[in-house]
Image (cartoon, coloured by chain):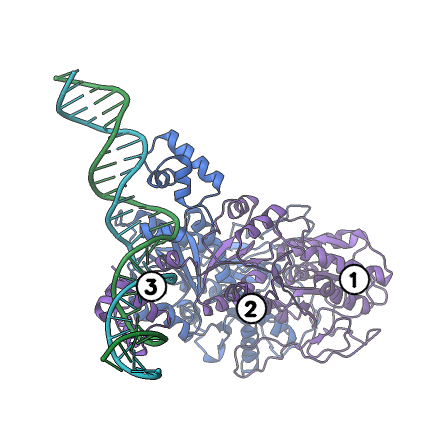
Chain colours: A purple, B blue, C green, D cyan
Amino acid sequence: MDATIEEVARRAGVSIATVSRSLRGREGVSPRTAERVRAIAHELGYSASPSASRLASGRAGTVAVIMPFLGRWFFSEVLDAAEPVFREAGLDLLLYHVGDRESRRKYFSVDLLRKRVEGVLLVSLPLTDAEIEVLHSLGIPVCTVGVALEGFRSVTIDDVSAARLAAQHLVNLGHERVALIAGDTEDPTLCGAPRDRRAGYRSVLEEAGTGLDPGLEARGDFTAAGGAMAAGELFARQHPPTAIFAESDEMAIGALGTLRRLGLRVPQDVSVVGFDDHPLAAALELTTVSQGVADQGRRVAEQLVASLTAGSGPGAGASEQVQLPTRLIVRGTTAVAKPAAGPSALAGAGDGKPRLGPAPGTRHGTAPGTVPRRNKEVAPTPGAVGLALPIRAQVTTQKGRAVQQ
Amino acid sequence: MDATIEEVARRAGVSIATVSRSLRGREGVSPRTAERVRAIAHELGYSASPSASRLASGRAGTVAVIMPFLGRWFFSEVLDAAEPVFREAGLDLLLYHVGDRESRRKYFSVDLLRKRVEGVLLVSLPLTDAEIEVLHSLGIPVCTVGVALEGFRSVTIDDVSAARLAAQHLVNLGHERVALIAGDTEDPTLCGAPRDRRAGYRSVLEEAGTGLDPGLEARGDFTAAGGAMAAGELFARQHPPTAIFAESDEMAIGALGTLRRLGLRVPQDVSVVGFDDHPLAAALELTTVSQGVADQGRRVAEQLVASLTAGSGPGAGASEQVQLPTRLIVRGTTAVAKPAAGPSALAGAGDGKPRLGPAPGTRHGTAPGTVPRRNKEVAPTPGAVGLALPIRAQVTTQKGRAVQQ
DNA sequence: TGCCTGAACGTAAGCGCTTGCGTCCAGTCA
DNA sequence: TGACTGGACGCAAGCGCTTACGTTCAGGCA
């Protein structure tokens, strides 16, 4: 068996209380003794049993991260960013994948969380009132990311404004038929994001005076395959769009695939904007709305750790709602609308250069979009350089070749 | 405070021992009593304190999943598939992100795992002998996926054969200059996969008699950005390739971006094969080697659960090494080599159709590649349909338009 | 010198369970 | 009717810690 605290105490010739105090850095032990105890503990390869110490102290030393998806980019990215924060704080990270209604019941009604964790991080999971009630009744800090919940601290973005960014960009390029590939607003495993992004999109179209056309909206399910289908639907309809805004990069990329199969060139025939700034978006030169996912993950984890350590300290921030900025990253999948678009035009020879020009209401963006490069060696590859624009600022130019599909 | 076992006992008018037995389904309790206890426990919203029960029973009820990356597709996919298996078995899933050398030391030398988990799932993490020693000394079941480790059960694929599949496909299409975008074989956070895939690639080239050319190998880092850079390097060299095999889809997609920027058409000018069957590979019609990642995740999790429940039962399978099959999925990024390739040819008008024809040694594949479709509604989208081929079987035809970039 | 003080340490009471073993008692059999 | 049996249950000893409180004792002060 592993060494226990008792063995360490015996070897050090002190009581187990002193060992505990020494190892936990509590006061009441002379520096010399503490040091000696620590040396012996290390020599024995001793480390306290978590269950014993949790039982005795009453603190779980664990946080739960609850997410509806693990495989989708947004979620794994949040997890990736949050993990080190918890680790740093000495907290174990218990992962909960909440999928269907059934597993949700297990997590919420049967208190799987109670006594097990001392904090909960909820990733983009919309909850019923009953579930929220359960969370509150746990009496432990709960932070959310991707969705704001009454009474809980959260880190989110303004999905409405972010979507407006994308839609406005397309409108300003002269597009009059801007389609939306939306997430499912009914899906119980998805949050308000699809609803808000659609709202942002619609508000821009209304302001533009082009009117809303239900025929311009199709549903993907936040996957590439769903995006591909949705694009297929859009172009099978009476009046196809000249531009597409997809609520996620994964759907946008799926749409790109469909467009290519249909022989439509991007951006010459159709412009496409995504949402997320997925790592592959840069590679594919997809114009997109960046929402700093890693940032969100890190921030919300820090928020949770703070709630945990501060206890009920300064009442401030009890339900702090952080909203992170988003920005449009213009790459190669968007261009000014063709004067008279014939959507039936099949793929023809293209010179590969998007016909970009100053859009109405132009303002120059300044902060260059960055393309992640971990490999620092020779860089003969012309990277896609986009422009990061504040809300409402519009595109003017871009460096780098655009897509030519 | 939450209800304790004592309160349940009091209300039920029995001893806490009986409550414990009733709730855990142990024998020694009359059915009537057990039922009554269960009802009362439920009424009180009681559930046993994990730390207390773990301390008393000595079982941790928790497994650790250790992975070097959380954000990369392969890893999050494995996690996604493994989680439900553990949940089903009533095991908590403790997530460990092992990044740099420093954090590795923490995980392995300081026994963060000891006393905390009763099983370990290691995802594609190569270990030093010392680290392996530590794992063995834990005396608990350890399973690995993505890499086979002496003395541990594992689920892997045959990376050499899988890579051969891709390389052979290109060679059979008539390509004589087949490049490799390789992962870093020196990276301590990566497993034998890059080494084996490179070996498979090289063996095919050697057999083909085209000889090995160091100028045909470049290093990505398993990211799209890395793949983009690597492709850039390859085409900046003296004798550019006519085909590229990338050791991951993410790198392949990055390479596609670079090729487009360089004005090279895929597959007319350059063929590209990836590795993984990433969800976006289907959307982009990337020819790739599918390695059934979800399968691997599920299988290895089941393996670990079995080791845990079987205890040291039938000695069989003590170090069972499962190897899952891989298959080539031919989509639109590969085509027969041009008779005389001028790699400097810039993008010209293309008819968008790959010049695919029967390759030498042809054999017809039968099992159709599947494109994940969760949305079951009208499907006007022409999905990419690839062919799943057993090892060494070669391409003949494919349905659906090919990429035209 | 006697007393007070506080740092340094020990004592022991839990924390909330699990489980081996002992007890009780309704049946069973001789 | 009494010894015997086994199912149903209670008792209590932990599991390995944390921590409130008690004890000891060297030093400082009047």
**Closer to us: D15 or B68:** D15
Which comes before the other along the chain, label 2 or label 1?
1
Q: Residue A316: give x, y in percent of width and height.
A: 61, 66
**Closer to us: B334 or A405:** A405
Q: CA distance from mark 2 to mark 1?
A: 38 Å
Chain ID for label 1? A
State the residue at coordinates (42%, 48%).
B90
Viewer-side label of 3, 1: 3
Amino acid type at circle 1 is: Thr
Amino acid type at circle 2 is: Arg
Amino acid type at circle 3 is: Ala
- Mark yes or no: residue B274 visible: no
Please tell me whether mark 3 sits on a helix, a strand or a loop. loop
Q: Which residue is labeled 3 in the image?
A: A48
Residue B20: image tag: none
Chain ID for label 2? A
Same chain for mark 2 and mark 1? The answer is yes
Which comes before the other along the chain, label 3 or label 1?
3
Q: Residue A264: give x, y in percent of width and height.
A: 73, 62
Task: Estimate how packed mark 2 is, as few (under 14), some (14 to 19) or many (20 or more) residues with alpha carbons within 10 Å.
Answer: many
Q: Which residue is labeled 2 in the image?
A: A298
Q: CA distance from mark 3 to mark 1?
A: 64 Å
Q: Residue A289: give x, y in percent of width and height.
A: 68, 67
Lateral position of residue C29 relative to residue B163, left or right: left
Chain ID for label 3? A
Lateral position of residue A17 relative to residue B253, left or right: left
Q: Residue A360: give x, y in percent of width and height.
A: 84, 73
Task: Estimate how packed mark 3 is, as few (under 14), some (14 to 19) or many (20 or more) residues with alpha carbons within 10 Å.
Answer: many
- Mark yes or no: residue B216 visible: yes
